[in-house]
Image (cartoon, rainbow, N blue to C red):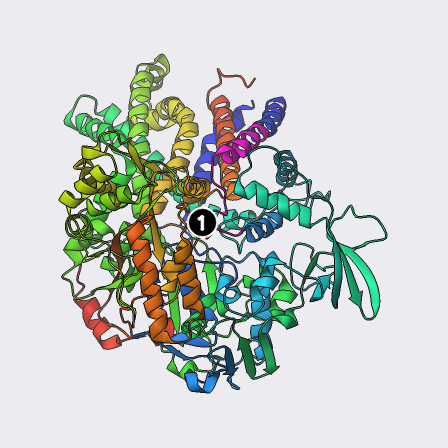
Amino acid sequence: MISFLAKRLLWFFVTLWVVFTISFFLMRAVPGGPFDSERKLEPEVKQAIERRYRIDKPLWNQYLVHLGMAAGLLSEDGQFRIGFPDLGPSYRIRDYSVNQIIAQGLPVSASLGILALSFGLFVGLLAGVIAALRRQTWVDTGVMLIATAGMAVPNFWLAGVCIILFVFLIPLFPAAGWGNLSNLILPAFCLGAPYAAYIARLTRTGMLEVLHQDYIRTARAKGLRGRQVIIRHALKGSALPVVSFLGPAAAGILTGSLVIEKVFHLSGIGSYFVEAALQRDYQLAMGVVLVYTVVLYTMNVLVDLSYAILDPRIELE
Amino acid sequence: MHPTTRKLYPLLALIALVGATLWATSFGTLPPADFTFNNGTEVKSIDPAQVTGAPEGRMIHAVFEGLYRPDPKTLQPQPGIATTADAADIISNHGKTYTFPLRRGAFWSDGTPVTAEDFRWSWQRLLHPGTGSQYHFVLSAYIVNAEKYHSGTVEIGDRVEVELPDRLRPGQIFPRGTMLYGRLLSIDKPKRPELAGQVTEEEAAAEQAAWKRQWIYYLKIAGKERKFSQSPDAPSDIEKCLSVLLDFDEVGIKAVDPHTLKVELKNPTPYFLYLMQFYVTFPINRSCLEKYGYPEWIRPENLVVNGPFRIKFRRLRDRIRLEKNKQYWNADVVKLETVDALAVESSTTGLNMYLDGDVDWMPSPPGDVIPKLKNREDYHSMSSLSSYFYRINVTRKPLDNPQVRQALSLAIDRERICNFILRAGQQPAYSIVPPGLPGYTSARADSYNVASARKLLAQAGYPGGRGMRTIEILFNTSDGHRKIAEAIQQDWQKLGVDVRLRNLEWQTYLATTRKMEYDVARAGWIGDYPDPNTFLDLFVTGGVQNETGWGNRQFDALILKATEEPDAERRMQILHNAEELLMGELPVVPIYFYMSINLVKPYVKGFYSNSQNLHPLSAIRIDEQAKQIQKSGRNGT
């Protein structure tokens, strides 16, 4: 397992470097710069700003300095140092550095993501198990119908419907904002619902397959009660496809959060993902891309690890 | 793998999940503010020298105070740090000298008094070329020698200031390095390198700046002759410096004594007091900036303010919480204890929050629901000092022909655009200057007339549009702009002119119009001060905001003449003549005048519609009784 983790760690840095390099050059290949605005700048003003943010330097120089800063090896003026990765200043939100912006936004995005994922897991697993146990009854049909619909519905549409229903018609929740738990329920529901639906389907399929296995028959034969068979033996086996889905689900929740954060005015980093790129805030866009890379990579490693632990047939390699 | 690990793992995973969920839901609650409004976006900065937008302006107006502040109803300058707005007490020398008496009871939040030196220093920072302010022209265009200081122009015999490269923080202008003052004897300019082939305007400017950095300046400082260069590679007998600028004492900004600020103008400028209530001219606290450095000085815990509010905290993308500044000289007038400025970007979300009662003031509700909102008692609209227009690239055929441009303008049915697309009471525009400026009558382009448009097009050599190439309308991506472009496309197709639409995302659109790679491009302009000049001087030959390629000597001469004209009435007449010229040649085709639309809860008092959409928070108060009634009777959609 140690060698597996070491290898993954090595690839982690390679992945980050590749993502950094591609994003760096792609962003700068698009026309328009961070300091273009409707009111055109005089050349001397523009140069003063560009000097301050060091974008007057040749591209390769900027690339090396920013790479060094992101790796925690260079300071902003090119001096050697060893420390925390520095993503540089934001061009758009000028009073803060990218590190500070991400430090403020990440907890919000993280709590939204965690809530959405826990909701998805809880509801999905429960619905899947119930549907599998009540196979081919109206319960099964009903759950699977809702699940299919849930997968097909885009989250911004769901958000709109939920706002009309639970904010205006039945005033249960605030329309938007961030501050207490009631602010988070609707967004987490809208973000997690499609995943709950998908997990329900996966669980149901996995459960049905497992229920026909010999070891389940053995468990029943030795006199275990139905509930125990399901929780101690069947659920573990049927959860495997769900575990492998968690990697892509985390990716989906991350990218889905930018819509939900906008609709519910949550101050996470999701909304920066698109806007920073549109505003040519190169540093902030890069910061968000790197954070996403780290989260996705970690989730995938965790999934691989869990898979090997849960299923004795799988070897870590 | 050890079997126990395997057994424990699901349990561990469950604990981790529950733990994470608990963490995710453990956030403290925030008591609501007295007054909450939607500021529209996360502000770029709260530094008056860095910003240009309305959301930033609202924050700066809340925490800083300049010489004047606008009356919430009429926008007339009201005394702020200056004690009087009476022209007779301030203006002398045929309108060219302004002497501002400053308030003695005004203090910064660190307890030090606000003085004339604060203004002088803040304005020096605004004008310094290294600051990179986009709005420096508010001072540099009017004050004696300010432009010279800003552009770094020095002439032989000038008194100059030299900054040595020994700054405490190299990337930051203040605190400055060692300053030397002397007289410029001569400049040794190396041969200017030839530019190879076709270069853009920007490349040429960059090249010139690089060349200027090689100059060697011969100065007389304290009786001794010394040589300086900005180039780090200059020979060792030449001293290195960061900049050689005109001595700031030569600029017409003088702190006569701590409570008297004197400003010398190049020309009588009737709207100068209005510029003095514009947020870029607000002073900032020097010791705060020099102590913490940029951008740390703007952090709520460090920021020293002199306005009606101070920043309690700032949560990025969420809100800025303001609280009343007890040290503000006029604190008695300020009724709100706490204010939340939310950074809600989606106007639909903003509207939801307003309707749900979380927000008390919502500017610019989404356009497509305005017809439904229009009849509500909390709907406030007023024509604002801003125009929506199309730029025409006159360097491209056949648009170089004024008759073609006139035909295109005549064929646009502006009434239809206003009544069926915009539907919020916008007025069709036949002039570039919006109505409502006192003393000014706009020059009008001709109204909608397809028959005469056809005739003009035929005269220009394109009868029925024959021989005319496809015209492209460029706009930045937005549904609203698309609908208008489509309407105009239909109008022009009636003339037989083929029109193609092209939308670009904002930043690319700006770069494209700047490089003049368009035929017709959508544009908008918000007046910076209530005077026709703010719209007209955009179009002087080679002006930075012109971007149409159009130039007319007579027009330039009129604009210049207007700046020098001391008589207000005659000046307006000259500006009118200039606009007449512009509307005859039509390098820009006006479409409509914007409206400022606000939704304001009825219990909010002290809020008035005005042409610049300025709503000082210091004037706003809440009628608590009305608020309670409204809350209990919760009016939803």
Q: Position of residue B60 (x, y in %)?
A: 45, 66
- The subunit carrying tag 1 is A
Seen from the viewer's position, the closer of residues A116 and B155 is B155
Whether residue B172 is visible to the viewer of this picture, yes or no, is: yes
- Left/right placement of residue A96 relative to residue B373 reads right
Seen from the viewer's position, the closer of residues B335 and A48 is A48
- Left/right placement of residue A89 relative to residue A163 reads right
Location of mark 1 (residue) = A37
Give the residue drawn at x 66%, y 54%: B171
Is residue B159 depicted above or below A263 in this figure?
below
Q: Position of residue A183 (x, y in %)?
A: 33, 52
- Left/right placement of residue B10 relative to residue B5 reads left
Q: Position of residue B7 (x, y in %)?
A: 48, 28
Residue, far top = A214
Q: Quadrant of residue B169?
A: bottom right
Q: Amino acid at mark 1?
A: Ser
Give the residue drawn at x 30%, y 43%: B478
- Residue A18 belongs to the span the image colors magenta: yes
- Residue B615 belongs to the span the image colors magenta: no
Image: magenta residue range: A17-42
- Secondary structure under tag 1 reads loop
Seen from the viewer's position, the closer of residues B219 and A137 is B219
